[in-house]
Amino acid sequence: MSTNHSRASSSGPPWWLLLLAAAGIAAGIYLWQMEPVPRLPSRSAAPPATAPADGPVDGTADRLGAVADASPEPGSAVEAGPKFPLPEGALQSGGPLPAVEDSDSPILDALLALASRDRLGQFFNMQDYARRFVVTVDNLPRQLVPMQWSALRPVPGRFAAGGDSERPTLQPENYARYDAFVQFVEALDPKTAAKLYFRFYPLLQEQYRALGYPHGHLNDRVVAAIDDMLTAPEVSGPIRLVQPRIQYRFDDPLLESLSAGRKIMIRVGPANAARLKKVLRALRAEIVR
């Protein structure tokens, strides 16, 4: 042991110390360049809790409505009944469910009742879909959804920002990037979608509790996410942007403080937002009775 230590000391810092320093520098650069994201679930372990909800600041809650957050505190030991129970008999159909690590194929096969395989793959990340669905739903009423675990694929096309470099604005042609997805969602049968949700609900609920809410109810969080998006403000006039680093942000601090779900409803444009809200109301009616 002493021989090895002397040899390492004489030849410079040990390799593991250099590796640790490099990792620390890389992590610092990453945190400086990127936006903060909630902790993500692991494929090999129970997912930890996501970051706490970041609500609006400086009176935004009073002016635009508080960000919905129906989740209990992660790790809460208080068992409470669901605020929005599933419709009676919703979980009576279907056979045994697969383990979460074996659920991708059964979920995809079931989703084929809604659209073709190619069509689904155009909009959804189908790998680890149960985890992705739960993480996405849980974070929609928060400040951001971690893209690494988003259930949706990124919208194709370039982000359209106009005006001069000093005062860029969100351009209406940017809204067209979302047209295909909105048309896809409008074509879904809400009753069929709700049946598929109920079919896999025990599996999704298991993932939600593993995320850090051992006594939480996923359906409450789904309804909270829907209600949060339904209350997204309608913005008139030019939407000014800033670009502090790589990604654009809303220049208005009130808009920038909104939840991820509400920001989506602004980014898609007023017409698409109205169409999406109609779909969300129909889905809500199916899962809350």
Image (cartoon, rainbow, N blue to C red):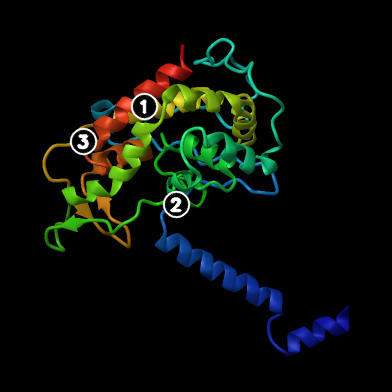
Residue 81 lies left or right of residue 285; in this view the side is right
| Count of numbered circles in the view | 3
Sequence-wise first label, 2 or 3: 2
Residue under numbered circle 2: 36
Q: x%, y% of residue 132? A: 54, 42
Identify the mark nearer the N-term, 1 or 3: 3
Residue drawn at the location 84% of the way across and 82% of the way down: 4
Q: Are marks 2 and 3 in contact (CB under 8 Å)?
A: no
- The answer to whether residue 72 shows anywhere in this view is no
Left or right of residue 8: residue 272:
left
Could you tell whether 226 is left or right of 171 in the image? right
Earlier sequence position, callout 2 versus callout 1: 2
Q: Label 3, on which residue?
A: 271
- Which residue is at 62% across, 31% downward? 209
* CA distance separating discs 2 and 3: 31 Å
**Is 189 located above or below residue 87 in the figure?**
below
Q: Amino acid at mark 2?
A: Pro
> Could you tell me residue 55's position as x and y percent?
38, 35
Of 137 and 99, the residue lying toward us:
99
State the residue at coordinates (43%, 46%).
Answer: 123
Residue type, label 3: Ala
Question: What residue is pinned by disc 1?
Answer: 280
